[in-house]
Image (cartoon, rainbow, N blue to C red):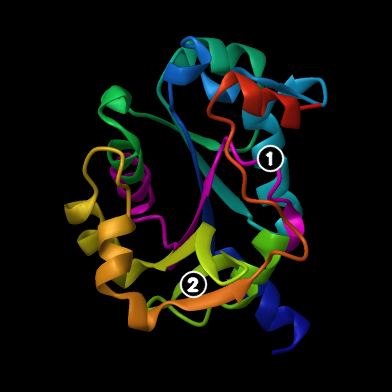
Amino acid sequence: MDTQDHHHAREEIAGLLLAAGGGRRLGGRPKALLEHRGRPLVEHAVGVLRAAGCGRIHVVLGARADDVRGRADLTGCVLVDNPDWADGMGSSLRAGLGSLTGTGARAALVSLVDQPGIGPEAVARVLGAYVDDTSLVSAAYDGVRGHPVLFGATHWPGIAAAATGDRGARAYLKKHAARIRLVECADVAEPYDIDTEADLSHLE
């Protein structure tokens, strides 16, 4: 694939950042607003997607969405409000995929706001495995499937239908496991989540 084709492929892929969670185990502090390197975590996560080559980025907001808008620089992103964010990640994934319908995007690269150990290198690897709108690609860490995950547009209706509660796309991916292309990323990223007070030690 020459550089021009490669750039074109990147244009077809939208970054979809799920940043709606309320941080229940963090005393109700929204994860999007946790500080990392002096800026809100959501801003850091957008920067990672941008550095990896995502031209179009949709960010799903939920908990304290107005505060997130006020404090984080999300210039150039499409901000998607998920009023049902408290129902779990599934509703945010549905809202995000819904916001991409009709945009011309042929794939969505889904990342989570609370995984700052996953940087541009891992995201770029997953992007690089995109072929067309039937692609299903997932980062893997020592062979175990993780994030980010890339969903070709043909999969969006099935994923949205199966996304309930906190499961997100897990049920769909399990069903289609044989079709997922795993891209090993353990050498360039760490897939920890910021879920509890102890996990805050990962933030700088």
Q: Quadrant of the N terminus?
A: bottom right
In the picture, measured across the screen, residue 132 lies left or right of residue 203, that is left
Left or right side of 155 for 25: right
Callout 2: helix, strand or loop?
strand
Tell me which amino acid carries mark 1.
Pro
Q: Amino acid at mark 2?
A: Val
- What is the C-alpha distance between the residues marked 2 and 1? 20 Å
Front-most of residues 199 and 151: 199
Assess whether residue 113 is covered by the magenta stretch.
yes
Q: Up-down: is 97 above or below 28?
A: below
Q: Position of residue 41 (x, y in %)?
A: 66, 28
Is residue 142 left or right of 107 when viewed as pictured? right
Work out whether mark 2 precedes mark 1 in sequence or the reverse, and give the earlier one: 1
Can the viewer see residue 73 in this picture? Answer: no
Q: For numbered disc 1, what is the local secondary structure?
A: loop
Name of the residue lying farthest toward the left: 161
State whether residue 129 is above or below residue 145: below
Q: Residue furthest bottom?
A: 1
**Can you tell which mark lies on residue 116?**
1
Q: Specify the farthest residue to the front.
A: 198
Residue 42 visible: yes
Does the stretch in magenta take in 193?
no
Q: Which mark is residue 137?
A: 2
Query: Which residue is painted at 42% across and 62% down in the image?
Result: 104
Q: From the viewer's perspective, is 19 left or right of 3?
A: left
Q: Residue at x 67, y 70 (%)?
A: 125
For the magenta stretch, what is the residue range? 94-121
